[in-house]
Image (cartoon, grey):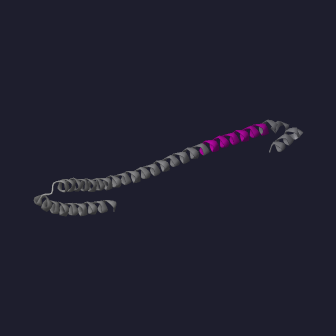
Amino acid sequence: LTQAVNYYARTPSYTSQSNCCYGLESWIKDQIKKRIVKAVIERDDMWIMHEKEQINFLKEANFKLLCGLHSEIERLHHELRGEKLLLYIWKQLLVQLEVMYFNPDPQLSESCCLMKVKVTMLTVTARKFSSNVKK
């Protein structure tokens, strides 16, 4: 286009139109600049939109991860509670057995048998509780 404009500008018959061609060339350059600016703005807008979508995706992924961690913490908390209950039961049993071992008494041996039954029942209940929590 520039070569054509220069050719017509040098030709004597078009010297009066050379200003017109120069104006056309200037107008074309302005249009090209406007299109480039518009394309750059459009590209920047698309990039900003892409970045916002990435941020939203990462927020959602982090939210899901934190929810999963929270539910796992809750599950482990309930499991720990069940294990603490079992530990407490066994400690109580050991205390009772020590008392009976060092104080042999017929009434204590009878209560020892009852205590063993109670501990067994509590152990079964605690294990059921723990297994329900693990599910």
Q: Looking at the picture, how far across and down is residue 116, in whole percent? A: 19, 62
Please state the total of marks drawn on the protein image.
Answer: 0
Q: Give the quadrant of the N terminus.
A: top right
Residue 74 lies left or right of residue 57; in this view the side is left
Q: Determine the residue located farthest toward the left in the rendered image.
A: 107
Identify the magenta region: 21-42
Q: Looking at the picture, how far across and down is residue 18, in whole percent? A: 82, 37
Q: Looking at the picture, how far across and down is residue 10, in whole percent? A: 88, 38
Identify whether 112 is placed above or below 65. below
| Residue drawn 75% across the image and 40% down it | 24
Q: As rendered, which of 1 and 39 lies closer to the eye?
A: 39
| Residue drawn 24% across the image and 61% down it | 123
Q: As rendered, which of 70 and 82 lies closer to the eye?
A: 82
Identify whether 52 is placed above or below 127. above
Q: Give the quadrant of the C terminus.
A: bottom left
Residue 18 lies left or right of residue 126; in this view the side is right
| Residue drawn 73% across the image and 40% down it | 29
* Dominant secondary structure of the residues highlighted in magenta in the image: helix
Residue 133 lies left or right of residue 103; in this view the side is right
Q: Is residue 9 located in the magenta-colored stretch of the structure? A: no
Q: As rendered, which of 87 and 135 lies closer to the eye?
A: 87
Q: Looking at the picture, how far across and down is residue 125, in whole percent? A: 23, 62
Q: Is residue 25 located in the magenta-colored stretch of the structure? A: yes
Q: Quadrant of residue 16?
A: top right
Q: As rendered, which of 121 and 48 lies closer to the eye?
A: 121
Q: Quadrant of residue 72?
A: bottom left
